Image: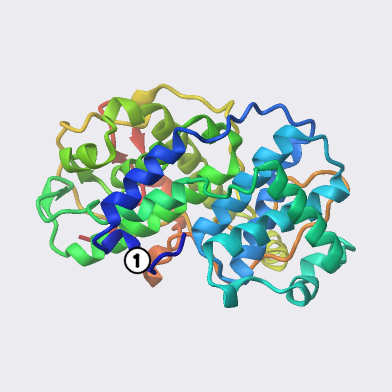
């Protein structure tokens, strides 16, 4: 759907957005009944590795994972076939979302280090056969909106000069927009890791990513009226999805702190293997009051710490299915790295920022 590089800024932005909202109502249902559902994270991360390697747009990555989810939900597929299915979903999504010159070529895919580690060689005939099977399964309709299709449109008004940061006026609007966009991308990738987010509409996931980003950055109100009007979601609508995102973020912060205090030999080993993500399951639940506050709550005035972002996440693997080798992690990450002072600090666990009245959450923030 790359009509323009920035369609959300064009004259047809509202029409495109309403078409996406209309289309998401008709999305196929996901039942979570695949016998290989426990392998989903591995193959979703495989898609992310290849997308990062070829610098494909987020919409292509999200569409590829969504195609994989729907296909796995309908068929019992062997592990060896899942590799072919995953990469075929990626190719179809990139052909639909990217320019032709950015679509990965067969030779380029086979030259990837992760392909040799999996002892997998793709053939033109095999890919064509799998692409046709996928297209027939989806009735040749790849116009399937994902959260990545909505996020940029929402980001266009996500920060306003009237917003407050920790109760104070925002001194640098551009910097705030940059940080919010980085965190929105981070939460967008979090939503790819667990199939539980498929129970929410893509537009709601995108809106929850923005709400979570505003919570982390201490922007108030957390869900301003302008975003409520644009998205048609109230704060209460976003609470279930936002809570899951915040639980995932809290786990990532704890994992980052553990990595910072680990022995040097362990850190060197992780550097060789690539950073490992902290996978989140739908079983993690916590009272909403522990993570979220009402939009009308004022922020306490306090000194701001150096900026911290969850930059430790990557598309390498922490828990791999038995017998599945790990692809080589990409050299660049899509996790917030706006400035050099965004690395998680070892002392961050001692910093408590009041997010609610009864829960001091270690929430990364930025210099005001």
**Looking at the image, which residue is at 87% across and 42% down?**
78
**Looking at the image, which residue is at 22% across and 66% down?**
174
Residue 316 visible in image: no
Where residue 218 appears, as percent x and y from the top left, is 25, 46
Report the front residue among 47 and 130: 130
Where residue 338 appears, as percent x and y from the top left, is 38, 67
Residue 53 visible in image: yes
Report the front residue among 271 and 164: 164
Height in image: 27 above or below 61?
above
In this picture, residue 245 sits left or right of residue 74: left
Report the front residue among 108 and 130: 130
Height in image: 76 above or below 93?
above
Height in image: 321 above or below 266?
above
Where residue 306 appears, as percent x and y from the top left, is 32, 61
Q: Quadrant of the C terminus?
A: bottom left
Where disc 1 sits, the SS reads loop
Where residue 347 appears, as percent x and y from the top left, is 43, 53
Q: How busy is the neighbourhood of tag 1: few (under 14 within 10 Å), some, or many (20 plus)?
A: few
In this picture, residue 113 sits left or right of residue 145: right
In this picture, residue 114 sits left or right of residue 248: right
- Count of numbered labels shown in the rendering: 1
| Pointer 1 residue | 6
Colour setting: rainbow
**Looking at the image, which residue is at 66% across and 38% down?**
70
Q: Quadrant of residue 171?
A: bottom left
């Amino acid at each position: 759907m790359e009509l323009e590089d920035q369609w959300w800024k064009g004259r047809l932005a509202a029409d495109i957005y309403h078409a996406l909202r209309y289309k998401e109502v008709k999305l196929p249902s996901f039942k979570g009944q695949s016998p290989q559902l426990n392998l989903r994270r591995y193959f979703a991360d495989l898609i992310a590795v290849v997308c990062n390697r070829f610098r494909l747009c987020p919409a292509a990555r999200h569409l590829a994972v969504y195609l994989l989810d729907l296909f796995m939900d309908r068929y019992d597929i062997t592990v060896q076939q899942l590799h072919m299915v995953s990469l075929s979903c990626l190719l179809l999504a990139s052909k639909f979302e990217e320019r032709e010159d950015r679509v990965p070529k067969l030779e380029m895919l086979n030259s990837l280090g992760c392909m040799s580690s999996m002892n997998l060689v793709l053939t033109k005939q095999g890919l064509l056969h799998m692409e046709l099977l996928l297209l027939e399964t989806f009735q040749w309709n790849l116009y399937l909106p994902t959260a990545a299709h909505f996020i940029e449109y929402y980001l266009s008004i996500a920060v306003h000069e009237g917003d407050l940061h920790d109760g104070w006026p925002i001194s640098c609007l551009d910097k705030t927009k940059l940080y919010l966009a980085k965190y929105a991308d981070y939460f967008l990738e979090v939503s790819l890791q667990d199939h539980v987010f498929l129970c929410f509409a893509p537009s709601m996931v995108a809106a929850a990513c923005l709400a979570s980003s505003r919570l982390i950055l201490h922007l108030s109100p957390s869900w301003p009226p302008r975003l409520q009007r644009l998205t048609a979601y109230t704060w209460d609508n976003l609470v279930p999805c936002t809570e899951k995102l915040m639980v995932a973020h809290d786990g990532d912060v704890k994992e980052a702190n553990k990595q910072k205090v680990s022995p040097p030999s362990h850190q060197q080993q992780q550097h060789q293997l690539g950073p490992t993500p902290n996978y989140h399951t739908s079983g993690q639940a916590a009272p909403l009051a522990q993570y979220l506050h009402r939009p009308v709550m004022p922020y306490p005035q306090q000194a701001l710490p150096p900026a911290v972002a969850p930059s430790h996440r990557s598309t390498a693997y922490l828990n791999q299915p038995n017998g599945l080798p790990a692809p080589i992690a990409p050299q660049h990450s899509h996790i917030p790295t706006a400035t050099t002072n965004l690395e998680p600090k070892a002392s961050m666990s001692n910093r408590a920022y009041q997010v609610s009245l009864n829960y001091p959450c270690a929430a990364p923030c930025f210099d005001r």
